Structures are given as structure tokens and as C-alpha cells.
Image: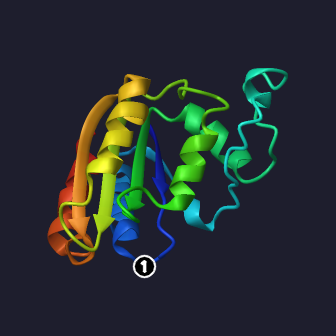
Amino acid sequence: MRILVLNGSARPDGGTAAMAAAFARGARGAGHEVDVLDVARMDIHGCTGCEFCHTRGDGTCAQRDDMDEVYPLWDAADMIVVASPIYYGSFSGQMHCLIHRTYAGGIPRRCKRMALLLCSGAHGVYDNAEGIYRGYLQGYFGAEDCGIFEATTSEARSQAMAKRLESFGASL
């Protein structure tokens, strides 16, 4: 299976990155092909709402930036894992830009499964991100929800979470 992990954290050694890395280790160990994109380090601009993609662009965005690297992986993925810290009750701004820009191509062509990894400084702040995931991403795509994993930063970096996510990745 080909898996795309979108890591929306700006912190390379943060909790979200630890969760994404543990999942990827487990999935690779099980023989899956895993691409991890550090979304916050990419040059991805926000959607301008120009509608070029749905008129003359025939599914292609008018903007030329690092989304050009994302689109082929997005469409080739059998599974997409969204990993993000929670900022002001939702995904990171960088992750929102990527999600909005997928409007150009629409539903990923091969994605049949999805999972969500969330990290924050406190419990009980995940509802908005879960709503976007269930309502627009996983729900709208018609993909199987393989799980939502939530943790505070210290929990995300723990051996227990690493084992849990490695096992999840290996079980696919």
C-alpha cells in the first residue's frame, strides 16, 4: 500500500513529528511505501479562489509552488494520514493551506483509507480538527476511517504512543 503522511508541524522535534515518525516506522516495517511531507517546511500558498482549476485549468491550480510536489503523491496514495498540531482549536495554518489547495484536484484518485494524528498542549481541544477530518476529508472522500490518535506533547513523545502508532502502522 502507498501511504502519504502529511506532517503539519513546524517543529521538527515536536510531538506531531514524533507521532508521524512512529506511524511511518511501523508502516514501512510492514512493507508499505510511505512518503512523509513536512508541510510546514514547504512553500504552499493559500487558495486564492480564482477558480482557474475548475475552468481553464481542468483540475490544475494556477499557482506554482510546492503543491506541485504534493498533487502526484495525493493522487497516488492508497491511504492519507493527516498529522497536525492543534493551533487555536484546529489544524496548523500550513496544513489548512494544503487542504484548501486540494480543491483544485478534488478527491484523491486512489485513497480508500485515512487516519488522523493530533497533538496539542492540552486535552479536549480536538473537536474542530476532527470535524474537518470527518466532514470534509475522510467523510467527503468516502475513505475508511482507520483511526484518530490524540495526545499532548509529552504523551506524543512517549514510548507508549510510539509503540501504539508503530503497531497501528504495521497492522495495515
Q: Element at badge 1? A: loop
Tell me where residue 122 sits by quadrant: bottom left
Q: Position of residue 111 (x, y in %)?
A: 45, 29
What colour scheme was applied to this rendering of the protein? rainbow
* Residue at mark 1: 13
Q: Amino acid at mark 1?
A: Asp
* Residue under the image location 41 percent in, 49 percent down: 82
Residue ranking furthest to the left: 160
Of residue 160 and residue 104, the one placed in the foreground of this image is 104
Residue 60 is situated, as x and y percent measured from the top left of the image, at: 76, 31
Q: Write the residue at 32% across / 54% down.
A: 117
What is the quadrant of residue 61 in the picture? Answer: top right
The one of 62 and 127 positioned closer to us in this rendering: 127
Image spot of residue 154 (x, y percent): 22, 78
Asked if one can make out residue 72 in the rendered structure from this viewpoint, the answer is: yes
Residue 152 is drawn in which quadrant?
bottom left
Instruction: Please name whichever residue, 94 or 37, is drawn nearer the observer in this view of the structure.
Output: 94
